[in-house]
Amino acid sequence: MTTPGQPLTVRAFQQLIRDRYYATDSARGPADTFVLLIEEVGELATALHDNRPGKNPTPEQRANLAEEFADVIAWLATLANIQGVDLEHALAKYTTPGAVEGVKD
């Protein structure tokens, strides 16, 4: 479990999401959960649009942007839990020299 004020690891976050929501999430299944993830990605897209350069976003719009990023990560963790994927292990490819090279344009 996590301690308030302490850094949150990917593994601890994924476990927190699992502990709180797994029963409902697994009953919903991966396909319907993916739809909810994409819905959150759409909300993030709107928040990004509201916070684009030159737009002068309000403090509420900035707070909403941060919330939408968190929601997308939470739904991704949910989907990973349903599929039995350890996100921290999966993300290790980015810390392994030579595993991920190049950039997308």
Image (cartoon, helix red, strand yellow):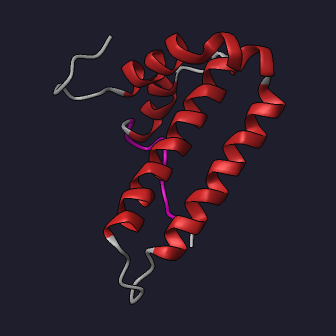
Quadrant in which the C terminus is drawn: bottom right
Residue 42: % across, % down: 66, 59
Asked if 94 appears above or below 8 in the picture, the reply is below
- The range drawn in magenta is 96-103
Asked if 5 appears above or below 59 in the picture, the reply is above
Q: Which residue is painted at 56% across and 59% down in the image?
A: 44
Q: Which residue is painted at 52% across and 29% down in the image?
A: 90
Left or right: residue 56 compared with residue 30: left
Q: Which residue is painted at 74% across and 32% down in the image?
A: 33
Residue 68: % across, % down: 50, 52
Q: How many marks?
A: 0
Left or right: residue 46 compared with residue 63: right
Asked if 25 appears above or below 74 in the picture, the reply is above
Asked if 61 appears above or below 71 in the picture, the reply is below
Based on the displayed image, in which of its 4 quarters is residue 58 positioned?
bottom left
Based on the displayed image, in which of its 4 quarters is residue 53 positioned?
bottom left
Q: Which residue is painted at 52% across and 42% down in the image?
A: 71
Based on the displayed image, in which of its 4 quarters is residue 62 positioned?
bottom left
Asked whether 51 or 85 is in front, the reply is 51
Residue 63: % across, % down: 36, 58
Q: Overall secondary structure of the magenta stretch?
A: loop
Quadrant in which the N terminus is drawn: top left
Is 24 in the magenta?
Answer: no
Residue 37: % across, % down: 67, 42
In the current view of this chain or complex, which residue is farthest to the right?
31
In the current view of this chain or complex, which residue is farthest to the left?
5
